[in-house]
Image (tube, rainbow, N blue to C red):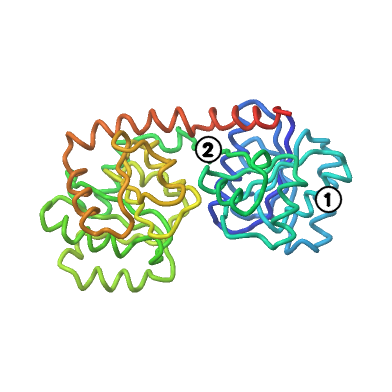
Amino acid sequence: MKFLFVGTNPENTGAATHFIALAQAMVEAGHQVSAVVYPNGLIANHLASSGVRLYPAKFRNIFDLRGYFATFKAARDLKPDWLVGNFGKEYWPLILISRLLSVPVALFRHRTPAMGKLSGYLVPRLAQRFFAVSSHARQVYLDRGVPPQLVRVLYNPVNMAWCRPDAQQRSDILHKLGMPQDAIVIGYFGRIHHSKGIFTLLEALDGAMGQEPRLHCMWLGHGPDSQLLGERIEAGSFAHRHHMLGWIDDVHPYYSAISMLAFPSIAPETFGRVSVEAQAAGAPVLGSNIGGVPETLSPNVTGLLLQPGNVAAWRNAILRMCDPEVREPMSVAARDFVDRHFSTRVVADEFVRILSDG
């Protein structure tokens, strides 16, 4: 198949990461992929060496005529089998171009907050395929009245090669951060915001670190509560065992350095890409039983599902995972689980199957 992806969002978001991974997955599967992208933005830079033909363009909003022109020209010249869009500001331009050129359009929705009333009603009905990125998100759209047959589910693809375990990488990162080589490292990768359950995790870690002297925590990310989190860590008894690394453009090497991942959100998540990537690197996941998180792991096989906000449950689960007899079988199972359900190969095949299903 021939695809034209359109994603002119310059920011680093989950939708941008999905856009990159899905475009690369389709290239790996042997399809011809081109993309309309923000010049020198995150998406453009990641796709530059992926065999994707890039067309620079900007959509400041749905009324940006320059974006329409660039996208229309690329679609007219390429004559793709499908247009693919990931970002709300491009839904209506793509639907219009789809009609003008008689090219079907597939649109992904990565957020569960409602679109405007008109868009919420029309977009799923006018796109030839409308995708949610989890069954949880799909149900939210159905609850708002979208007919079930109009909302398909396609999970985020994960490149297994990028996330493979690397013992040398782990050793180098631990050395760089001043951690002992036998450290048990729990990782938090994400936005530093109270809705992500970071303070539940911190309180649980205080209890767990008091019982397990090898336990360290690696915090990757930034957000409005970064300063408060840092202050609370410094006020605690185990500040030297917390490592706040801030924002890191490429987190993939750091998955190799963690023994487990914490995903402690107290607000519903649409999906949870970090959970899947961590498991691809052989790191079991402690995840909140909320939103789309349960779909990202196999409970008691590749990780544990826990009650959001329950400090005691999180402390006990962390300590349980410190036991190698519990953690190591989950580590082995985790990578196989991701390969079977979320690898680029599996998701690319499923995408084509859904697009071909009349």
Identified by mark 2, the residue type is: Pro
Question: Residue at 72% across / 54% down in the picture?
Answer: 121
Q: Quadrant of residue 334?
A: top left
Label 2 environment density (alpha carbons within 10 Å; few <14, some 14–19, many ≥20)? many
Q: Residues within 10 Å of mark 1 (few under 14, many from 20)?
A: some
Give me the residue at 86% from left, 41% from top: 76
Instruction: In this rendered view, identify the residue nearer to me: 346 or 134.
Output: 134
Q: Which residue is mark 1?
A: 96
* Residue depicted at x 69% and y 56%: 120
Q: Which residue is mark 2?
A: 157
Q: Earlier in the sequence, mark 1 or mark 2?
A: 1
- Drawn side of residue 4 relative to residue 285, left or right: right
Where is residue 1 drawn, in percent x and y? 72, 28
Image quarter of residue 114: bottom right
Looking at the rendered structure, the number of numbered marks drawn on it comes to 2
Is residue 355 rendered to the left or right of residue 235? Answer: right
Q: Please indicate whether residue 114 sits to the left or right of residue 68 in the image.
A: left
